[in-house]
Image (cartoon, rainbow, N blue to C red):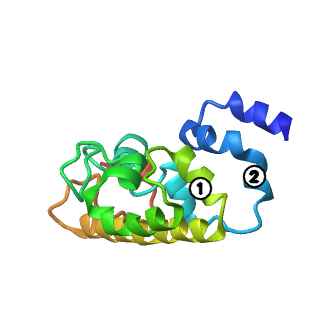
Amino acid sequence: MDKWKDELGSSRSASWTVDAIRPRLQDWTNRRWGHLSYRLVQMLSGHGCFGKYLHQIAGREPTPRCHHCPEVSDTVAHTLFDCPAWEAERRPIANITGLDASTLAEVISKILQSEDAWKAFHEFSERVLTTKENAEREREADPESAPLRRRRRAGRRRREFIRQA
């Protein structure tokens, strides 16, 4: 466990997630509840339907802005803590954990304390990211959207599409 903690400490990638989980690594690995679903991992990592990720990493958005409020940068932290569009979805987490969290480390600490807290965070991740994914699909399908946003034909990678253009 110590070796794993040391290796995570020297990691240059996924610092948002590593910084939050590393101090509680023993608790994380010994927990008796909670599976890691696709959307929960997206919420923990920031890799998903977040404007910043879609703009900077995936190259699928012209800007990192939030499509659900006026914020200029839609990050996982914005979605999880600040975006007014998800206020109702955040309420069950606050009710169960008694936490008005402002960091992922605080969230991790709380969801490791009870199965109910883990379930509330899991349900938040599922609801919010499903909604964000559906909105992204609508933008992709819109013939008026920017070419980089439009849905690609099945089986074609972005690089191949760019080479042919």
- Which residue is rendered at x = 35% and y = 65% of the image? 132
User: Picture quarter containing residue 2?
Assistant: top right
Mark identifier at residue 43: none
Q: Nearer the viewer, residue 1 or 136?
A: 1
User: Tag 1, which secondary structure?
Assistant: helix
* Residue type for callout 2: Asp
Say few, some or many: other residues with alpha carbon within 10 Å of mark 2 (under 14 / 14 to 19 / 20 or more): some
User: Picture quarter containing residue 151?
Assistant: bottom left
Q: The N terminus lies in which quarter of the figure?
A: top right
Q: Residue furthest toward the front? A: 98
* Residue type for callout 1: Lys
Residue pointed to by mark 2: 27
- Which residue is rendered at x = 18% and y = 50% of the image? 70
Residue 50 visible within the image: no
| Residue 12 percent location from the top left of the image | 61, 30
- Which residue is rendered at x = 58% and y = 40% of the image? 14
User: Tag 2, which secondary structure?
Assistant: helix
| Residue 91 percent location from the top left of the image | 39, 66
Say few, some or many: other residues with alpha carbon within 10 Å of mark 1 (under 14 / 14 to 19 / 20 or more): many
- Which residue is rendered at x = 70% and y = 27% of the image? 10
Q: Quick check: marks 2 and 1 in contact, CB under 8 Å?
A: no
| Residue 16 percent location from the top left of the image | 54, 40
Relative to residue 153, is residue 4 drawn left or right? right
Q: Nearer the viewer, residue 134 or 162?
A: 134
Residue pointed to by mark 1: 110
Q: Is residue 83 above or below residue 131?
A: above
Relative to residue 83, is residue 155 drawn left or right? right
